Amino acid sequence: MDGVHDQNAESFREFVASRSSALLKTAVLLSGGDRHAGEDLLQNALIKVAGKWNRVEDPEAYVRQVLYRQQIGRWRLKWPKREVSYGEVPDGVGSEGSASSAELRVVVREALGRLTARQRTVLVLRYFEDLPEADVARLLGCSVGTVRSTTHRSLARLRGLVPELGPGPVAPPSSRDYAPVEVRP
């Protein structure tokens, strides 16, 4: 029995060593760019997964699901801990009409921190994790329509906070907007 436990422990250590940096990036984004909160989120997720490691079939997908669900749990707290910290905005951001990519990353990260946890999570899942709307809805336990509307509102708010992003591409009309209608005389 100890051999099986040792194999599981070693397998878990190898997984954490090889995948923790990628998982940390996701956790930091889910936490609004706060590295310390992201580290806490990932650590708590790994603690939960460690106890079930021998039953996990797809470790990375399972850890990511635990991360998302923990973040959802943070939104649903009746009195969530709200820490607000503001650093100084770097000089010259947006002063030349367009920001450099490094400056833009800083500004976008700060803007992500100003979104609600739900808005931030939907954007991370849709655009960082590149998940389809149906998968995001399944992970978050809501409808596809809720994911669409939250994505739309989140992007609008993000563009309002970071004018350098511009208005964004105009989405082509969907086929249901222009369904053929039979006209009778």
Image: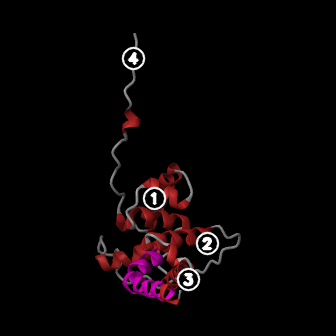
Does the rendering let one see residue 31?
A: no
Tag 2: residue type?
A: Arg
How far separated are the C-alphas under marks 2 and 1?
23 Å
Residue underneath mark 2: 74
Magenta residues?
A: 5-29
In this view, the mark in front (3 or 2)? 3
User: Whole-Å distance between the Cαs marked 4 and 2?
Assistant: 52 Å
Q: Nearer the viewer, residue 166 or 83?
A: 83
CB atoms at circles 1 and 3 under 8 Å apart? no
Q: Residues within 10 Å of mark 1 (few under 14, many from 20)?
A: some
Whichever of labels 4 and 3 marks the residue nearer the N terminus, that label is 3
Q: Secondary structure at mark 1?
A: helix
Residue that carries the numbered disc 4 in the rendered image: 183
Residue 16 pos. (x, y %): 43, 84
Residue drawn at the location 36% of the way across and 57% of the way down: 167
Task: Answer with mark 2 or mark 1, whichever residue precedes in sequence.
Answer: 2
Mark 4, secondary structure of its residue: loop
The residue singled out by tag 3 in the image is 47
Secondary element under disc 3, as helix, strand or loop, is helix
- CA–CA distance in space, label 4 to label 3: 63 Å
Mark closer to the chain start, 4 or 2: 2
Q: Position of residue 19 (x, y in %)?
A: 39, 81
Q: Which mark is residue 173?
A: none
Q: Which mark lies nearer to you, 4 or 1?
A: 4
Q: Secondary structure at mark 2?
A: helix
What residue does disc 1 label?
156
